[in-house]
Structure formats: structure tokens, C-alpha cells
Amino acid sequence: MSTEPLFHMIAGATRPVAPFSHAVETDGFVFLTGQMPDSPETPGVLPDGIEAQTRNTMTNLATILAGLGLGLEHVVQVRIYLTEFKRDYAAMNAVYRTYFPADRLPARTCIGTTGLAYDALIEIDMVARRP
């Protein structure tokens, strides 16, 4: 049974810098827009280094999930974009793996890209599924 999509803007999440929703939900799936490593308090200001940027990005995604009554345990797919793929892949992975238990790892793609907004080193988007 198909339902009309729900478009979500989450209080306390980073404010979009372009015309998009934080998440769109349809048929039990929740598609989270790619998040950057800035924070709601300091939009456009990024921490130094891939480790801090990965933590901030994951925090931003967790905030959106929490605003929808979900958590990282509901994530089924992740896409990661890195501007310095060869340099930052291992360090990003070291931080990323702390967010998911080894027996519940979502499907994942990691893509090297030439540039992101704010000169960020990382952007991550996710798909979650309601239980």
C-alpha cells in the first residue's frame, strides 16, 4: 500500500542552505538529505580534520533521525562523499565504525568527489526504515 510522501523539517537540526527537506518519508522508508559537518549553532563553520568532521556529520544525521523518532539502528543504507578519498578514508572509517555495532552495519557506498559546500571534507546521506 503506497502512501503520500511526508516532508520533514526537524527542529534543532542544521538549517538547509538550499531548497530541500531534512528528510522525506514514504512507504516506511526515510530518506535523509546529505548532511555536512557544520552545526546548527555555527552554520558554515567546520571543525578541522576528517575525524571531527565525521563526528559532526553523524551527529547531524542522528539529530534528524531522533526528530523522527528513529535512531541509527534503523539505518539500512549510507552514502559517504569524501573530497580527499585516499588521505581520509581510513580515518573516516575509524570514526564511522563507532556508530554502528558490527552485527548491524548498513549497506554503504563511499564516493570520492572533487568538492563539497563550505569546502567540507565529508558529506553523508542515509536511508532508514521504520520498524
Image (tube, rainbow, N blue to C red):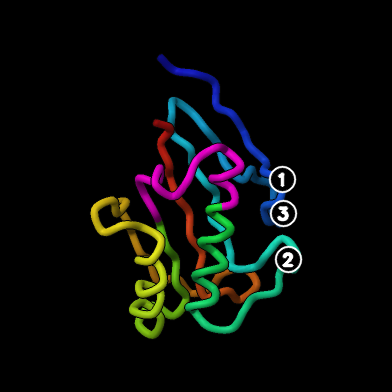
For mark 3, what is the residue? Answer: 15
- Residue 96 as seen in the image, left or right of residue 13: left
The local secondary structure at tag 3 comes to loop
Measure the C-alpha gap from mark 3 to mark 1. Answer: 9 Å
Is 59 in the magenta? no
* Residue at 44%, 50% in the rendered image: 72
Instruction: Point out residue 16 in the picture as x, y percentages from the top left corner.
Output: 69, 53
Vertical position of residue 131 compared to residue 116: above or below? above
Q: Which residues are magenta?
A: 63-78
Residue 43 badge: 2
Measure the C-alpha gap from mark 2 to mark 3. Answer: 8 Å
Instruction: Point out residue 70 in the picture as x, y percentages from the top left corner.
Output: 50, 40
For mark 1, what is the residue? Answer: 11
Tell which circle, 2 or 3, labels the residue nearer the N-terminal end.
Answer: 3
Q: Quadrant of residue 97?
A: bottom left
Vertical position of residue 93 compared to residue 70: above or below? below
